[in-house]
C-alpha cells in the first residue's frame, strides 16, 4: 500500500507531465494565465501538489509566477531547451520532427569535434573499449534487437563524448540519448540498421584508437548526416510529401521497417 507521501509524489509527477505536455503542444498557449484553484479542481489534486508542479515547470522556464497576475505560461524561447524533460515533451508533441532536426543540428556541431578530440586525447585502452562497443553494436544491429541496439548506441555516443576529454561535451550525452530514444519511440528509426551505418560506427572507433583525428571527425559527421537524411526519408514515406514540404506541426506516424542508418 502506498503511503500518503508516495501518493502525493505520484500526483505531482502526473501533473507536471500533463502540464508540460500541454505547454509543449500549445494547448496551454503562451502568455495564458493558470489559476491554481482551477488546476486543483481540474486535476483533483491539493494546492500543495499544484504549487510543487508549477515550481518544477517554472524552473524549466515554462511557467512564471507574477505578483498580482498569477502563473503565466511562457513562450518557447524562455524554456530550458537542454532540459531532458522539455526535450521529451517537445518530441511527444506534433512538432517532434522540428525538435529532432534542431537536436541533430546540435549533434552535428558537437559530436564530430568530440570524435576528433577523442582521437587526439584518448588512451589506447579507451580506444580499444570503443572498438569493442562498436562490435557489440554491430552484432545487435545484425540480430535486429532494437532495444539492445538503442541501449548500445546510446552508450557508444556517450563514450565518444567522454573520450573527448571535454567535460562540457561529456554532459551533452543526455541530449544524444533523447534524440536516439525519441526517434525510436516515435517511429523515425528503422528496425534494421544499414551495413554502411554500422561500418561508420566502427570507423569512428578505429580512428579514435589509431589517433586519426580527421578520419574520426569525418565518420562521425557522416553518422549525424545520415540520421538527418533518414528522418526526412521516413517522414516522407509516411506522409507522401518531401521533408521540406511536410508541415512542421504534422503528426509523425510510425513508418514501416526501413533498412537505413542508425544514429
Image (cartoon, rainbow, N blue to C red):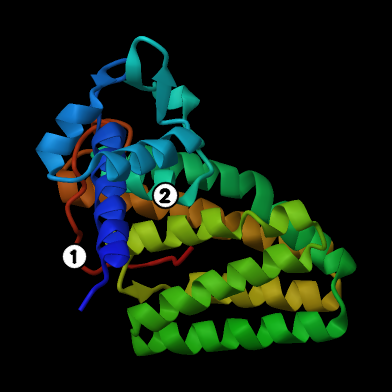
Is residue 86 left or right of 172 when viewed as pictured? left
Q: Residue at x 16, y 43 (%)?
A: 240
Q: Give residue 185's position: percent from left, percent from top.
A: 29, 62
Residue drawn at (73%, 66%) of the image: 162
Residue 124 position (above or below residue 109): below
State yes or no: discs 2 and 1 in contact (Cβ < 8 Å): no
Image point (45%, 57%), residue name: 178
Q: How far separated are the C-alphas under marks 2 and 1? A: 28 Å
| Badge 2: residue crowd in 10 Å (few <14, some 14–19, many ≥20) | some
Position of residue 94 in the picture relative to residue 173 (left or right): left
Decide if residue 27 is in sight here: no
The front one of 60 and 89 is 60
Q: Position of residue 227 (x, y in %)?
A: 46, 56
Residue at position x 51%, y 36% from top?
80
- Residue 143 in the image: x percent, y percent? 37, 90
Residue 208 picture quarter: bottom right
Indicate the secondary structure of the residue bearing disc 2.
Answer: helix
Residue 229 shows in the view: yes
Q: Out of 38 and 101, give the one closest to the viewer.
A: 38
Task: Name the residue beneath numbered marker 2.
Answer: 85
Q: Residues within 10 Å of mark 1 (few under 14, many from 20)?
A: some
Mark seen at residue 173: none
- Residue bearing mark 1: 256
Q: Does residue 74 sit above or below 148 in this rendering?
A: above
Amino acid at each position: 500500500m502506498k503511503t500518503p507521501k508516495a501518493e502525493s509524489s505520484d500526483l505531482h509527477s502526473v501533473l507536471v507531465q500533463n502540464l508540460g505536455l500541454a505547454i509543449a503542444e500549445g494547448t496551454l498557449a503562451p502568455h495564458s494565465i493558470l489559476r491554481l484553484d482551477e488546476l486543483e479542481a481540474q486535476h483533483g489534486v491539493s494546492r500543495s501538489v499544484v504549487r510543487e508542479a508549477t515550481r518544477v515547470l517554472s524552473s524549466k522556464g515554462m511557467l512564471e509566477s507574477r505578483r498580482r497576475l498569477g502563473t503565466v505560461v511562457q513562450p518557447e524561447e524562455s524554456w530550458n531547451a537542454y532540459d531532458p524533460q522539455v526535450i521529451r515533451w517537445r518530441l511527444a508533441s506534433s512538432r517532434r520532427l522540428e525538435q529532432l532536426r534542431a537536436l541533430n543540428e546540435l549533434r552535428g556541431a558537437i559530436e564530430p569535434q568530440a570524435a576528433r578530440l577523442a582521437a587526439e586525447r584518448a588512451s589506447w585502452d579507451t580506444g580499444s573499449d570503443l572498438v569493442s562497443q562498436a562490435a557489440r553494436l554491430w552484432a545487435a544491429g545484425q540480430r535486429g534487437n532494437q532495444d539492445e541496439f538503442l541501449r548500445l548506441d546510446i552508450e557508444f555516443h556517450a563514450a565518444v563524448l567522454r573520450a573527448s576529454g571535454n567535460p562540457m561535451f561529456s554532459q551533452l550525452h543526455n541530449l544524444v540519448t533523447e534524440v536516439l530514444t525519441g526517434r525510436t519511440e516515435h517511429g523515425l528509426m528503422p528496425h534494421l540498421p544499414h551495413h554502411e551505418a554500422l561500418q561508420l560506427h566502427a570507423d569512428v572507433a578505429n580512428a579514435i584508437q589509431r589517433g586519426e583525428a580527421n578520419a574520426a571527425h569525418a565518420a562521425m559527421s557522416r553518422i549525424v548526416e545520415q540520421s538527418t537524411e533518414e528522418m526526412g526519408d521516413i517522414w516522407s514515406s509516411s506522409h507522401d510529401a518531401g521533408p521540406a514540404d511536410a508541415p512542421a506541426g504534422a503528426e509523425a506516424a510510425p513508418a514501416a521497417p526501413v533498412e537505413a542508418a542508425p544514429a
